[in-house]
Amino acid sequence: MQFEKTPGWLDWYAGPSKPRFKLPAGAVDAHCHVFGPGADFPFAPERKYTPCDASRQQLFALRDHLGVEKNVVVQATCHGSDNRAMLDALAHSQGRARGVATVRRGVSDQQLQAMHDVGVRGVRFNFVRRLVDFTPKEELMEIAGRIAKWGWHVVVYFEAVDLPELWDFFTALPTIVVVDHMGRPDVRQPVDGPEFELFVRLMREHANVWSKVSCPERLSVSGPKALNGEQNAYLDVQPFARRIVREFPDRVLWGTDWPHPNLKDHMPDDGLLVDFIPHIAPTTELQRKLLVDNPTRLYWS
């Protein structure tokens, strides 16, 4: 089946640099995706965008190039609740990948068990209106209750301005809750301003809430300006990610977000995204927690 990319879609960076920062043994890219290929795994009819192809083979090649040992493959919205592309990646990973699925209310226990057996450990609820249609919260809560018995967690994707109306739902979830990309803060605002302070409060008051300190390229306004010869500074994002890593070192995750869906301004060099890590986790201990201990505990224990 042939699919035509959404106009203006940026393909992933084809020649990533070799990171200067050497990742610790056992490092996990805890947020990445596969798209299709569309000829093998068609995109969902209800999708809001049509991406480029980004296969498991290309993901695993990037993994090895960056020095990552394992991946967590998050179901992409362009595939809806058809998890076959993600599950195929897990099945061919030789145990080096886990997955986060998108499921609907009608999913059976047998289907959930089959996904668990291949490596799924969570479900994703997307609240970004431009990417998905609204799903009733009572349906999502029902799904969360069902997956809890497998020890799965819920990944939530939302924008910072929507946190107040989502607070009660998030704090009622019966599982670990992993927030994508620090809840997409507006980095033009102060790191100690009321918007980000509300997110910090969510993590402080609810010990089951984790955060991915990923996607500086998606959050940044300043972009990858040079800093001491390093091109991936994303200076305006650093204080936000560094604060979360410092205050909640046992509940943070990092990922590339490869192949970087829906970026409009620039496509990041994934090698430089690795080099962002020591700017937000400046000590060996924090780096090991962020990259090895936390994702291993959540996905491989």
Image (spheres, rainbow, N blue to C red):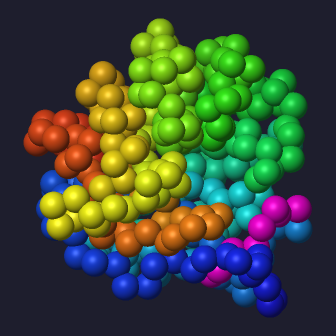
In the rendered image, the quadrant that contains the N terminus is bottom right
Q: Is residue 146 above or below residue 105?
A: above
Judge whether residue 58 is colored magenta: no
Q: How many marks?
A: 0
| Towards the viewer: 224 or 105 | 224
Q: Position of residue 89 (x, y in %)?
A: 52, 69
Could you tell me which residue is drawn at 88 percent across and 62 percent down? 46
State the predominant SS element of the stretch in magenta. Answer: loop
Judge whether residue 50 is colored magenta: yes
Q: Position of residue 112 (x, y in %)?
A: 67, 45
Q: Please state the extent of the stretch shown in magenta in the rendering.
A: 46-53
Q: Which of the 4 quarters of the picture holds residue 249?
A: top left
Could you tell me which residue is drawn at 37 percent across and 69 percent down? 270
Q: Is residue 267 above or below residue 103?
A: below
Q: Position of residue 255 (x, y in %)?
A: 41, 53
Q: Which of the 4 quarters of the picture holds residue 9?
A: bottom right
Q: Which of the 4 quarters of the picture holds residue 153?
A: top right
Q: Position of residue 279 (x, y in %)?
A: 23, 47
On screen, residue 87 versus residue 50, left or right, reads: left
Could you tell me which residue is drawn at 63 percent across and 57 percent down? 75
Task: Tell me if I can see residue 150 in this picture.
Answer: no
| Towards the viewer: 64 or 213 | 213
Could you tell me which residue is drawn at 77 percent across and 76 percent down? 6
On screen, residue 27 versus residue 107, left or right, reads: left
